[in-house]
C-alpha cells in the first residue's frame, strides 16, 4: 500500500548476486516438490515476469501455490512444475524486510482509487532507489516501523501530501499531549480567546480554510484527503448520513444549531440506525468527543429512552449485551468496569464504583487522582478538594485550559467559579507542604528513611556525573579520529574517583575491579595499567572486539559480551573497560550453585559457539576461554566474555587461569612448543574441554542418569 514497502540492505548486494547465480545453476536440475510443502522451508520458484529462479516460501496451497519471494517481498501464484527443492546452502535467512512508515495509517480497501493512487506514488518514489531509514520500532509480525529519507526528503511526508494517508495522532498520544498540542497550535493564547477562536474558525472562515486548519491540527496536508479521511473515520454505509455528519462537523458551527440538527437526524432516521451510527462514531473518535456526544445524547433523550434505544440498536434487550456494547464503544474489555462506566453515564451507581470505572476509562493516572477529578463532572465533592486533585491529574497541561475545557464541555461551572477554585487549590497545596515540612522537623527520622535518602542522593550524584561525561564525551578526546575509529567506544578521560564504586576483589585479584552504576544498570570497571605504547594496544584490541559484536547486533543472540565504554584515567596510568555486571553469572558460579541441565547446556554452549564463530570470522583469536570468562544469562543464553587486552594471545593462552576443574584448557600444540601463537583451532579445543567439564559435572551430580560421558543427547550439540 502507500505506507508499506519491502527493501534490501545495500550491504547484501553481493549476497543477492551469489544467490542468484547459485539458483540459476542448481534449480533447473533440482527435484520438484512432492506432496504438501512445508511453510517454514525455503523453495525455488520461477518468477512469471522474467522466467528467472528466486527463493520463496509457500503461503497457501490450492490448485496452485501462493508463494512469497523472500528476497524481494512480492507474491504470486505458481504451478507445481515451477517449484523445486533447494539444498541446505540456500536455506539462508531472507534478505528483504518489510518496512512501514511510523505514525501513518491507510485505507484497507485495495480496490479504491485512493489505495491504488498511493501505492503507485510510493512505487514511483522509491522503486529501485537507495533510501536512508531510521528504525523506530518493530511490530509483532516483524514489520519494521521506520522514517525513510531520500537525501533530505522525508518520503513519508511526501506520500502524506499526495495520497489519502492519515496520521494516527490521537491513537499514539495521550489525552494530556493532545490538549497540550491544541494549546501550542493556537500559540498559547488566553483561554477565552482560544475557545472563541475555535468558534470563529468554523463559523466565519471559508470551507477550504477550515479544512486546511483541520489538516494542521491532525498533521495532514491535502484538502481532498481530509474529506476522505472523515468518511473513513465514520465508516458508515449510509451516504446521506455521512454527508450530513460532515456538514454538521465542518460547515455548521453554532452549538444550538448543531444540537437542533442532531435532533432532526434522530427524528428522520430509525432508532436502530441512529444508535448504531453513534456507536461507530464513539468507537472511532477520541474520548473528549465521546463525552461531548454523550452530553448531546442525554440532552435530547430521557434515560429510559436511552436504555431502550441501545437495546433496540443491537436487537437485544439483555443488560449483559448492553454492557458489552458499551465496552466496545469505550474500548474496554472487562465487563465489571463497563458496568461501572454505564453507572457513571446514567448516575445509577455509588460514588466509589463511579470513580473506579472512570479511572479505567481515562487510563491516565493513578486511581486517587482520577477518583477526585470525577467530582468536577458530577459535583459530588467539595470545591477545593476536587480542583486540587484535578490539578495533579492534568499536571502536564495548562491547568486553566484543562479546567475551563471540562467546565465548558459539561456546562457545570462558570468562569469565576473556575478561577476561584484554582486559587483555593494552590492555597491548599501550600498549606499541605507547610504541614509536611513541620511534621518532618518535629519527628526524628528512622535509620531506614535516612539510608533511603542517602541512597537516593548517591544515585542522583552518579546520574549527574555520567550526564556530564556524556555531554562532554568528545571534548577531551585527543583526536576525533580516535573516537571514530573506536566505533564510539572511547569516552572522556576522567578519574575513577568520580564513580560511586564498590571494590570487587572476589572477582579478580590481578587488577583493579570495581562495580558501579551507569545509565541505570550495574557495570564492572576493569582497570589496566598502561603506558603510551600499551594505551594504543588496548585501544586497538578493544575496538576490534567491540566492532565484532556491533556488526552482529541485528542478530537476536550475538554470543559476545558487550563493551559499554573505554576511558583513560587523568591522574593515574590506567585504562578502564566498562562491561555489564551479571551477579553470579559466570559459568563457574552457575555450575557451583546449580549445574546446568542437558537442555540448558545445549542452549548456553550454542551461544558460546556463536560468539566464537563471530570472533574467528573477524580474525580474532580469543585464547582465554575458561569458566570464569563465559557468562550465562537466565540459564539459557551463553556469551563469550572479554579477554585481557594488555596481554598478547600467546600470553593469554598459557595463563594459569586456563583450567576447568582438573582439566587443562590449553591446546596440546601450545604446551609442547612455547611461544606458538594460538589459532582458532585452539579456541575450539578449549571449547570442547569446557563442554566436557560442564557435562562431566552434570553427570557426576545426577543420580538418575548413567555415568557415561558419551550420552548422545548432549553429544548432538
Image (cartoon, rainbow, N blue to C red):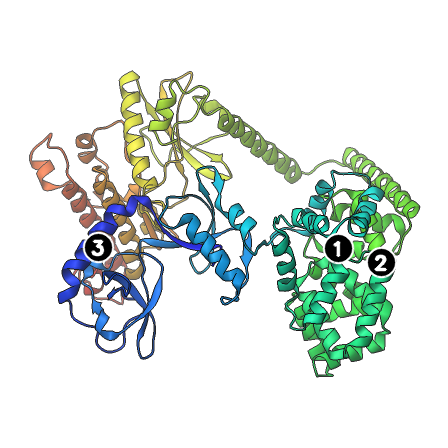
Q: In this view, does 577 lie to the left or right of 288?
A: left
Q: Where is residue 364 in the image (x, y as percent from the top left)?
A: 69, 53
CA–CA distance between discs 3 and 1?
61 Å
Place residue 368 in its image quadrant. Answer: bottom right
- Quarter holding the C terminus is bottom left
Disc 1: which residue:
370
Q: In this view, does 193 lie to the left or right of 494?
A: right
Q: Name the secondary structure under disc 1.
A: helix
Disc 3: which residue:
20
Place residue 358 in its image quadrant. Answer: bottom right
Residue visible at 15% across and 61% down in the picture: 26
Q: Is residue 348 visible?
A: no
CA–CA distance between discs 3 and 2?
66 Å
Residue visible at 86% across and 67% down in the picture: 299
Q: Where is residue 164 in the image (x, y as percent from the top left)?
A: 56, 56
Relative to 392, does residue 547 appear above or below in the rendering?
above
Q: Name the secondary structure under disc 2.
A: helix
Give the foreground label among 3 and 1.
3
CA–CA distance between discs 2 and 1?
29 Å
Relative to 81, does residue 377 appear above or below in the rendering?
above
Q: Which mark is residue 584?
A: none
Disc 2: which residue:
255
Q: In this view, does 375 lie to the left or right of 598?
A: right
Q: Earlier in the sequence, mark 3 or mark 1?
A: 3
Q: Name the secondary structure under disc 3.
A: helix
Q: Nearer the viewer, residue 374 or 117?
A: 117
Q: Where is residue 600 in the image (x, y as percent from the top left)?
A: 32, 58
Amino acid at each position: 500500500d502507500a505506507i508499506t514497502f519491502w527493501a534490501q540492505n545495500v550491504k547484501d548486494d553481493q549476497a543477492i548476486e551469489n544467490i542468484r547465480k547459485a539458483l540459476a545453476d542448481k534449480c533447473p536440475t533440482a527435484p520438484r516438490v512432492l506432496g504438501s510443502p512445508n511453510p517454514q522451508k525455503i523453495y525455488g520458484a520461477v518468477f512469471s515476469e522474467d522466467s528467472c529462479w528466486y527463493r520463496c516460501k509457500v503461503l497457501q496451497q490450492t490448485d496452485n501455490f501462493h508463494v512469497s519471494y523472500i528476497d524481494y517481498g512480492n507474491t504470486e501464484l505458481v504451478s507445481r512444475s515451477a517449484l523445486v527443492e533447494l539444498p541446505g546452502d540456500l536455506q539462508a535467512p531472507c534478505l528483504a524486510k518489510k518496512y512501514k512508515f511510523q505514525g501513518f495509517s491507510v485505507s484497507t480497501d485495495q480496490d479504491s482509487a485512493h489505495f491504488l493512487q498511493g501505492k503507485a506514488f510510493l512505487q514511483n518514489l522509491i522503486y529501485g532507489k537507495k533510501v536512508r531509514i531510521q528504525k523506530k520500532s518493530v511490530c509483532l509480525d516483524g514489520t519494521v516501523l521506520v522514517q525513510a529519507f531520500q537525501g533530505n526528503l522525508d518520503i513519508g511526508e511526501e506520500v502524506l501530501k499526495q495520497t489519502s494517508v492519515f496520521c494516527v495522532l490521537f491513537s499514539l498520544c495521550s489525552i494530556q499531549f493532545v490538549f497540550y498540542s491544541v494549546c501550542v497550535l493556537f500559540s498559547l493564547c488566553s483561554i477565552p480567546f482560544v475557545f472563541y477562536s475555535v468558534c470563529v474558525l468554523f463559523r466565519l472562515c471559508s470551507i477550504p480554510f477550515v479544512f486546511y486548519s483541520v489538516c494542521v491540527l491532525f498533521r495532514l496536508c491535502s484538502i481532498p484527503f481530509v474529506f476522505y479521511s472523515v468518511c473513513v473515520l465514520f465508516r458508515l454505509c449510509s451516504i446521506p448520513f455521512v454527508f450530513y455528519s460532515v456538514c454538521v462537523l465542518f460547515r455548521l458551527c453554532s452549538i444550538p444549531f448543531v444540537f437542533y440538527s442532531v435532533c432532526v437526524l434522530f427524528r428522520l432516521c430509525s432508532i436502530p440506525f441512529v444508535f448504531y451510527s453513534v456507536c461507530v462514531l464513539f468507537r472511532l473518535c477520541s474520548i473528549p468527543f465521546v463525552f461531548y456526544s454523550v452530553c448531546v445524547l442525554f440532552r435530547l433523550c430521557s434515560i429510559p429512552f436511552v436504555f431502550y434505544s441501545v437495546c433496540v440498536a443491537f436487537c437485544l434487550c439483555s443488560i449483559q449485551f448492553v454492557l458489552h456494547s458499551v465496552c466496545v464503544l469505550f474500548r474496554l474489555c472487562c465487563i465489571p468496569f463497563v458496568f461501572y462506566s454505564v453507572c457513571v453515564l446514567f448516575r445509577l451507581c455509588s460514588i466509589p464504583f463511579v470513580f473506579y470505572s472512570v479511572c479505567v476509562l481515562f487510563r491516565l493516572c493513578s486511581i486517587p487522582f482520577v477518583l477526585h477529578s470525577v467530582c468536577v463532572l458530577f459535583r459530588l465533592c467539595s470545591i477545593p478538594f476536587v480542583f486540587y486533585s484535578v490539578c495533579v491529574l492534568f499536571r502536564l497541561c495548562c491547568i486553566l485550559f484543562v479546567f475551563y475545557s471540562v467546565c465548558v464541555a459539561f456546562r457545570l461551572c462558570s468562569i469565576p467559579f473556575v478561577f476561584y477554585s484554582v486559587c483555593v487549590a494552590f492555597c491548599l497545596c501550600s498549606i499541605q507542604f507547610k504541614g509536611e515540612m513541620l511534621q518532618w522537623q518535629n519527628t526524628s527520622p528512622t535509620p531506614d528513611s535516612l539510608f533511603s535518602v542517602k541512597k537516593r542522593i548517591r544515585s542522583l550524584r552518579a546520574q549527574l556525573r555520567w550526564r556530564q561525561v556524556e555531554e562532554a564525551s568528545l571534548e577531551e578526546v585527543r583526536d576525533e579520529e580516535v573516537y571514530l575509529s573506536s566505533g564510539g567506544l572511547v569516552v572522556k578521560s576522567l578519574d575513577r574517583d568520580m564513580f560511586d564504586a564498590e571494590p570487587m576483589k572476589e572477582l579478580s585479584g590481578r587488577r583493579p575491579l570495581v562495580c558501579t552504576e551507569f545509565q541505570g544498570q550495574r557495570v564492572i570497571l576493569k582497570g589496566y595499567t598502561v603506558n603510551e605504547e600499551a594505551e594504543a594496544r588496548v585501544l586497538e584490541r578493544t575496538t576490534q572486539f567491540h566492532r565484532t559484536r556491533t556488526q552482529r547486533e541485528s542478530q537476536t543472540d550475538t554470543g559476545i559480551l558487550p563493551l559499554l565504554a573505554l576511558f583513560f584515567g587523568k591522574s593515574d596510568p590506567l585504562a578502564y573497560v566498562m562491561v555489564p555486571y551479571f551477579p553470579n553469572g559466570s559459568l563457574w558460579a552457575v555450575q557451583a550453585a546449580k549445574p546446568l541441565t542437558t537442555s540448558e547446556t545445549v542452549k548456553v554452549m550454542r551461544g558460546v559457539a556463536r560468539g566464537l564463530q563471530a570472533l574467528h570470522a573477524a580474525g580474532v583469536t580469543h585464547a582465554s576461554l575458561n569458566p570464569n570468562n563465559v557468562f550465562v544469562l537466565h540459564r539459557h543464553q551463553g556469551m563469550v566474555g572479554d579477554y585481557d587486552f594488555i596481554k598478547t594471545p600467546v600470553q593469554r593462552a598459557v595463563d594459569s587461569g586456563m583450567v576447568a576443574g582438573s582439566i587443562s584448557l590449553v591446546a596440546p600444540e601450545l604446551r609442547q612448543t612455547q611461544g606458538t601463537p594460538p589459532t582458532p583451532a585452539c579456541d575450539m579445543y578449549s571449547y570442547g574441554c569446557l563442554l566436557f567439564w560442564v557435562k562431566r559435572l552434570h553427570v557426576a551430580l545426577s543420580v538418575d542418569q548413567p555415568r557415561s560421558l558419551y550420552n548422545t543427547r548432549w553429544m548432538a550439540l
